[in-house]
Amino acid sequence: MTSPADAAPPASDAIVGLDGLARPLWASVDPMLRNYYDTEWGMPVRDEHALFERISLEAFQSGLSWAIILRKRPGFRAAFADFDPDRIAGFDENDVARLLQDEKIVRNRLKIRATITNAQATIALRQQGGLVDFVWAFQPAETPQPRMQAEVPTRSDASVALSKALKKVGFVFVGPTTMFALMEAIGMIDTHLLGSHRRGSSGVWR
């Protein structure tokens, strides 16, 4: 009888690149996405400015591919004052009109207004300890351990709770699926495939 120690490891659909490193399919073809995966995605973000940017970009990504958002990221930063909440909070209708004419970003009126609203909510949260502590308070006790991309969830109890809490303090475009994507991107959970060379790279999860 074959012992557990002799059994073949569970299958993984991670792709081994020419560099010998294993990544999920979404990060295996496009050099831009591969670099983002290797250097940024899943790494802890504990700075208000950077976290506000991630929340804003995740909102703009809703209904679109992340590749579109990532390619337009320099344009977003230029259009939205480098995602400085204090500056964006003061945007008015003239700024909204300007942004709707800017081809370097996603020109969606509701998402543009949401970014302004969320900047104002971020400033207000400073009275309660700040955006970073507020968001990270919803870090779950366990993280997924997917071997296959199909095993990666798209929402969780923690993302539902975070979504509800953010909406309660004035944020918009922060649904449970969007917040799960945020939690993945900022290292609150680790959804790197177990076979990926990036698994555990955040230092938050082992």
Image (cartoon, helix red, strand yellow):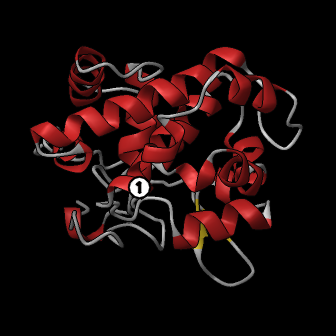
Q: In terms of depth relative to the viewer, which is nearer, 175 or 16?
A: 175
Q: Residue at x 43, y 35 (%)?
A: 119
Task: Give the class, few, some or many, for how many residues have Cα within 10 Å of label 1's Cα (few <14, many ≥20).
Answer: some
Q: Is residue 34 visible?
A: yes
Q: Is residue 77 above or below residue 163?
A: below
Q: Quadrant of the C terminus?
A: bottom left
Q: Quadrant of the N terminus?
A: bottom left
Residue 84 spot, x, y in % from top left: 49, 51
Residue 104 spot, x, y in % from top left: 84, 44
Q: Secondary structure at mark 1?
A: helix
Q: Is residue 3 visible?
A: no
Q: In terms of depth relative to the viewer, which is nearer, 173 or 196?
A: 173
Left or right of 178? Residue 17 is: right
Q: Is residue 61 above or below residue 87?
A: above
Label total for image: 1
Residue 74 spot, x, y in % from top left: 73, 57
The answer to which quarter of the image holds residue 131 is top left
Left or right of 87? Residue 143 is: left
Q: Residue at x 63, y 15 (%)?
A: 110
Residue 81 spot, x, y in % from top left: 61, 51
Q: Residue at x 45, y 38 (%)?
A: 181
Q: Which residue is mark 1?
A: 49
Q: Residue at x 42, y 29 (%)?
A: 118
The answer to which quarter of the image holds residue 86 is top left
Left or right of 82? Residue 95 is: right
Q: Is residue 198 above or below residue 125?
A: below
Q: Residue furthest bottom?
A: 19
Q: In terms of depth relative to the viewer, which is nearer, 49 or 54?
A: 49
Amino acid marked by disc 1: His
